[in-house]
Image (cartoon, rainbow, N blue to C red):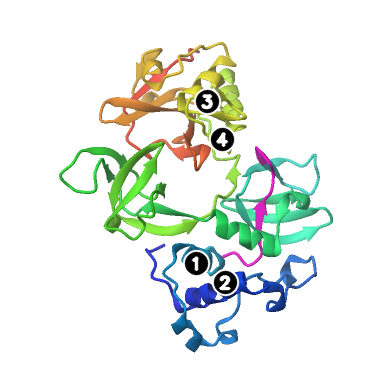
């Protein structure tokens, strides 16, 4: 999506929501009580025809919170019946059928968003990101609660619209290039710089700047992760498959700098250290140290279970586990936690094999 100038629709939403915080919204908005998703009203959103456009002249919509709220409740996300995952920690299982024994098809992180397509008894059929399936309805925020939570959780992100996007240490072209990002890679925006010529971003916990010319800026909510993203190549050993399966079960869990808990919080090297330890491979709690604790291989030799290292130039500061199909699983940053990415989302500095078969 392109960097957005607020549309008339968004202005209407902003106006409605600013009044909504001052006047009891339930006196002004008719919310359907039918539990069928097809008949549920869009809480907090009014049509353009329902608002006197002349009244907008007296309102300021420059306040970032008001703008973010308006955007999050507008047509940007494409949600008409939004649901927010309401679990205290970890992930909500997404299943192929409305049954606790149904095949697991995805992980729905706490505070992630979905479209509620329908409800069947205690279950809701949802779509989120690339995943669709059933979740227990009791763990979803819906209606007014969901819209309000979405406005609270929405964060600005920058998506690279070019290959080899340069991330610089300072907001100018004369300084050092610290990273290059792949086309389509999404990173969090820092310090409300979304409207600046140089946008401050978070790349795996490091701060840098990208030119606004080469990114698309929008608000974003977390979505579900598919379990079928990992692709295992021909001839993969059982231990490699087991390592990847074990690592993938923690996708969506928290990133904590210095952390070593796969469930309560871990950083990048803590993640690889703990996953490999499960299979008798003991690594240091440092990405730079881990880069020297195995056999160096080329990217063409990569197999699931191998380690890939990233850095600023040749200075290594991040590590991930290759899971096959050109993808990695890694403890990325505070916003995304443990996630799946393309292995070229940044330029790899080194590849190392610590599993021998």
Q: Give the range drawn in magenta.
A: 78-91
- Give the distance between the C-alpha atoms of the residues marked 4 and 2, in whole angstroms: 32 Å
In the rendering, which numbered label is found on residue 254?
4
- Give the distance between the C-alpha atoms of the residues marked 2 and 1, in whole angstroms: 8 Å
- Give the distance between the C-alpha atoms of the residues marked 4 and 1, in whole angstroms: 29 Å
Instruction: Let me know if residue 329 appears in the view.
Output: no
- Mark 2 touches mark 3? (CB < 8 Å): no
Task: Name the residue rendered at 20%, 48% in the picture.
Answer: 172
Question: Is 88 part of what is drawn in magenta?
Answer: yes
Find disc 1 in the rendering and name its residue. 66
215 relative position to 128: left or right: left
Q: In this view, does 17 lie above or below 137?
A: below
Give the SS element for disc 2. helix
173 relative position to 91: left or right: left
- Mark 2 touches mark 1? (CB < 8 Å): yes
Find disc 2 in the rendering and name its residue. 17
Foreground: disc 2 or disc 3: 2
The local crowd at label 4, few if under 14, some if 14 to 19, many if 20 or more residues have their Cα within 10 Å, is many
Foreground: disc 4 or disc 2: 2
Find disc 3 in the rendering and name its residue. 259
Give the SS element for disc 4. loop
- Give the distance between the C-alpha atoms of the residues marked 3 and 1, in whole angstroms: 35 Å
């Amino acid at each position: 999506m392109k960097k957005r100038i607020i549309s008339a629709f968004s202005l209407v939403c902003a106006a409605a929501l600013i009044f909504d915080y001052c006047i009891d919204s339930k006196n002004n908005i008719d919310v359907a009580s039918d539990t069928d998703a097809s008949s549920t009203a869009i809480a907090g959103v009014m049509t353009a025809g329902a608002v006197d456009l002349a009244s907008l002249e007296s309102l300021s919509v420059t306040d970032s919170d008001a703008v973010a709220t308006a955007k999050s409740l507008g047509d940007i996300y494409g949600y008409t019946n939004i649901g927010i995952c309401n679990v205290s920690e970890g992930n909500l299982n997404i299943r192929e059928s409305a049954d606790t024994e149904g095949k697991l098809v995805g992980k729905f992180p706490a505070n992630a968003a979905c479209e509620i397509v329908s409800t069947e008894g205690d279950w809701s059929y949802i779509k989120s990101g690339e995943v669709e399936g059933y979740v227990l309805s009791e763990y979803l925020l819906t209606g007014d609660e969901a819209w309000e939570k979405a406005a609270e959780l929405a964060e600005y992100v920058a998506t690279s619209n070019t290959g080899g996007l340069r991330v610089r240490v300072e907001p100018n072209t004369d300084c050092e290039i610290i990273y290059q990002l792949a086309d389509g890679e999404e990173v969090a925006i820092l310090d409300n710089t979304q409207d600046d010529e140089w946008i401050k971003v978070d790349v795996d916990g490091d701060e840098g700047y990208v030119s606004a010319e080469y990114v698309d800026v929008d608000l974003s909510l977390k979505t579900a992760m598919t379990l079928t993203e990992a692709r295992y190549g021909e001839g993969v050993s059982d231990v490699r498959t087991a390592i990847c399966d074990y690592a993938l079960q923690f996708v969506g869990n928290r990133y904590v700098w210095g952390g070593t808990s796969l469930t309560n919080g871990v950083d990048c090297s803590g993640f690889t250290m703990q996953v490999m330890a499960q299979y008798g491979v003991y690594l240091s709690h440092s990405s730079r140290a881990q880069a020297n604790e195995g056999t160096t291989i080329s990217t063409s030799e990569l197999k699931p279970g191998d380690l890939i290292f990233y850095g600023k130039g040749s200075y290594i500061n991040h590590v991930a586990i290759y899971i096959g199909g050109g993808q990695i699983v890694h403890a990325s940053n505070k916003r995304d936690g443990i996630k799946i990415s393309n292995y070229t989302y940044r330029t790899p500095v080194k590849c190392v094999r610590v599993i021998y078969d």
